[in-house]
Amino acid sequence: MTLDPVHFDGIADLARRIEQDVDASDHRAFAETVWNEFLDPLWDGNTKVLEPLDEVARKRVDIADVALCDDRFPTCHGIDSGTINPTTFKNGLVIDVAQAAMSAVPSDLELHRSRTMVATVHTNDTAGTFDEDWSMFDDGYSRARLFKVPRVNRYEGAVVHALALYLAESKHALLQADVVEDLLVLDGPIYPKGLLNWENRDPELRELLVEDKRPRDVVENYVRLVERFANREIPLIGFVKNSSTKAITNAVRGKAEAPWVNDAAFFAKVLERHADGERLTDCLTFTNWFVSRGGADETFSVKGDALGIDRDRPDEDYEVTFFIIYDPRQDLVYKVEAPYAFTKNEELRERLTMQLLCDVARNRGPPKVIGKADELARISQQEKESLKQKLEQTFHADRERTYDDVRWGLDY
């Protein structure tokens, strides 16, 4: 059944009534105030949650010009992990399966062939162990492991998903680290924020992260990755396509009403350019680099405890730093993260900035190496369904389903 025209018009009228109470120019004006007066540094109580590495600045580069710039790094590698998504079976098992892959520009077909696969299992049956050592397949190009996750009373799907995703990605990155000669780009943040956010999500998840060795071991993999690349003086960065952090927004709301939803919306307000009421699309705009110590980034700040994980380098080397790129062609905000171990070097910081600006300008979005890693690691919808059917056959147990599976045509 579809909406009748009268119903459609009724919804549109509601939207018009909302729009009359929302003045975008007021939002831009307040965002300008925050940009000019709040960020050098930004305090949340007694904590500096944001601090510029140099001066607070907005910059721009002509898209056509920067797209033609020479690469600052001769080779580039990217890494990503994809999953089939958590699946619950009638025998009580909750499972997710992840595969991680590394890409290279220029291409390296043998590297692209390699995979790290992890199947995470949650069960309330105390008899089964499920944990296995790594097993090799595909003539030694790939490896796989079965991993039993800690028992929880809720959030079983979230636990199997996060641990599968991050264990596969971090282990594959460590396995292939020596292949990287110039730059490694993670598809996403430099630390597993999906795990670190457990501290603020639910008491049970917070206790799990702090008390259980298994999720901490996954986080530790990322610490070792930072150390390995810092010791080799090869930069490691994260390209965040969909940032939903609210560290700045929450800190500002402690002082005034911040009307935007999250930090990405704030940066869009201060980075978009207008003339005669129209958004200008000829330039990429971007910020200076900041040190971030709010939200999940607090864990690896100089005031954080890093979950008790031993670290070999000075604490400040692990701090999260970032800058923001705004692409007006698609009205999108991208966040580029790097450990302070790399961005404390001004010359390297500038090279990283220009490399990412060149990539975004050329590709109208994420760097090519990230697109290739995403393509290699992605598990298609058809493949997900086939794998889930195979698991049903293996377990001799059907998947649990809800009415929505039937309602929306997802019946199996």
Image: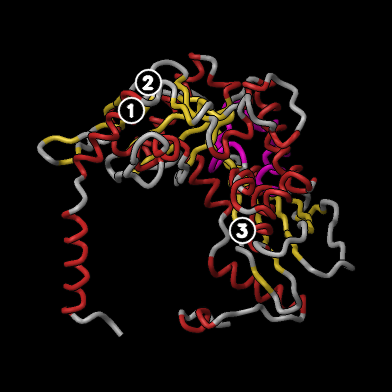
According to the picture, the residue beneath numbered tag 1 turns out to be 35
Q: Which residues are magenta?
A: 167-191
Q: Residue at x 75, y 34 (%)?
A: 308
Query: Residue type at mark 3?
Result: Thr
Image location (x, y in percent) of residue 291: 51, 25
Which corner quadrant holds the C terminus?
bottom right
Query: Residue type at mark 1?
Result: Trp
Q: On screen, 305 above or below 261?
A: above
Q: Quadrant of residue 329?
A: top left
Q: On screen, 332 above or below 14?
A: above
Q: Nearer the viewer, residue 110 or 375?
A: 375
> Is 409 on the left-hand or right-hand side of 194?
left
Image location (x, y in percent) of residue 30: 27, 35
Asked whether disc 3 touches disc 2, contact meaning CB atoms under 8 Å apart, the reply is no
Residue 106 visible? The answer is no
Asked whether disc 1 touches disc 2, contact meaning CB atoms under 8 Å apart, the reply is yes
